[in-house]
Image (cartoon, rainbow, N blue to C red):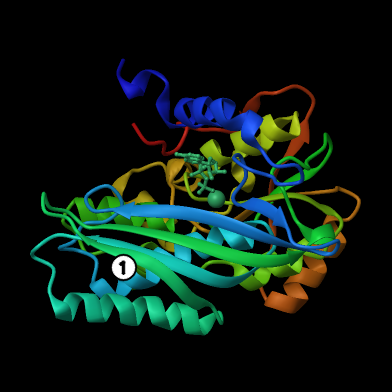
Amino acid sequence: MNLKSIGEFGLIAAIKEQFAALNHEGVRGIGDDCAVIPLSATKSLVITTDMLVESKHFLLDKISPYELGYKSLAVNISDVAAMGAKPYVSLLSLALSDDISQEWTAKFSEGYHDISKQYGIALIGGDTTAAPTGGVAISVTAIGVIDNDKIKYRSGASVGDIVAVTAPLGASSMALKLILEGGEPPKKLLQAHYMPEPMIYQGEWLSKEVGVTAMMDISDGVASDIRHISTLSGCGIEIDIKAVPICEEVDAICKARGWNPESFALSGGEEYSLLITVNSDTFEDIKYRYMNHFGCGLYPIGRCVEGNSISYINATGDINDGFTHF
Ligand code: ADP
Ligand code: MG
C-alpha cells in the first residue's frame, strides 16, 4: 500500500501504537515537539531529532553550506524552545555524496558552530558516512534541560484560552516560492528561510508563565500545526483570519502579484516562531510584559472552543492544511 494513503501522521500514529507498551514510566514519548525524560524531582531532559534531506528540505545549489549548517541546528533547537527548555547539547550525523568537497564541509561546520556558540550548545557526538547513491542528508539530535514545573506541552489548552503566535508569518514560505520560480527574494525573506532564528529566549520566558497553557513551534504551518494542539488538548480552535499577522514584505509581494497572503501565513511551513495558547484572564498581562522584555508582540489569532474542529472566520480564500510528508 502506498504511504500516501495513511500519510505522515498516520505512519507516526501506527509506530506510536506499536511501541506504546514499551514506554517507561514517567517518560513522555512520541507526540510532542520533544520527548521528556525526568532527571530528578525538579529537572528533566527534553530530546528531539530532525532530518534535513537534499531536494526535500533544501536545494544543494541554492543554500550555502554555511546557511545549511546553521539551519540544521536551528530547526532542531526550535523544538527544544517549543517545550520551554534551554538547549544544552547536540549530536550531528552526516551522509555525504561523493561530490561534497572539504571546503563545503568546512563551511557547513562553521555555520553549525556559530549557532552552537550563539546559544551555548556543545556538540557531543554524531555519525559520518558516505552516500554512494548520491544526495546529502543531515540528522541532528538536540537535548535541552528544563525545570519539571515549567514544561509546556501541546496538550495543555482549554476551552476559552487565547491562541497566539510570536511573530508575523509567511516570510519563509514566500522565500521558497520565489526561489523555486528562479527569482531573487528580498534579503529579509531569504534570511527567514535559510537562517531561521529559533525562539530560544522567548520559549524559555514563556515557559515561566503559568498562564501559557500549550506551546509548539510552527514547522508545518499554523493550519497544520494547530491540529496537534486541538487533538492533544481535546478542544476545537477558531481562528480569525483578519487577526493573523502577516510579514510586511509578504503582504506587499502578494498585493503586487495577486496572491493570497493568508495562504502563505497559515499554510506556509518553516516559520520556527511559536504557537501558544494562553489563559484569557492572563493574556493581556503576559503580552504587556513580553513586549517590555522582547520589544515585540504576542499576536492573538483565535480561541480554543468546544468540540474538536478547526474553524476559520473572516477567510477570503481556501486555507489548505499546510505541509505534510508523502
Ligand atoms: P516536529 O514537527 O515538532 O519535529 P513531527 O511532526 O516531526 O514534530 O513529529 C511528531 C512526533 O512524532 C514527535 O514526537 C516525533 O518525535 C515523533 N516521530 C516522528 N517520526 C517518528 C518515527 N519515525 N518514529 C518515532 N517517532 C516519530
Ligand atoms: Mg516542532
Neighbor class of circle 1 (other Cα within 10 Å; few <14, some 14-19, many 20+) is many
Task: Residue 157: give x, y in percent of width and height.
Answer: 78, 41
Direction from residue 56 to residue 207 in the image, left or right: right
Task: Residue 323: give x, y in percent of width and height.
Answer: 41, 39
> To which residue does mark 1 refer?
68
Task: Residue 194: give x, y in percent of width and height.
Answer: 34, 66
Q: Which of 245 and 89 is in front in this view?
A: 89
How many numbered marks have been drawn onto this rendered protein structure? 1
Q: Name the quarter where the N terminus is drawn.
A: top left
Residue at 15%, 63% in the rendered image: 61
Give amino acid for label 1.
Leu
User: In the displayed structure, would residue 244 be above or below residue 119?
Assistant: above
User: In the displayed structure, would residue 93 be above or below residue 133?
Assistant: below
Residue at 84%, 64% in the rendered image: 42
The image quadrant that residue 148 belongs to is bottom right
Task: Residue 4: give x, y in percent of width and height.
Answer: 34, 23
Q: Name the quarter where the C terminus is drawn.
A: top left
Q: Please indicate, yes or no, whether residue 286 appears anywhere in the rendered image.
A: yes
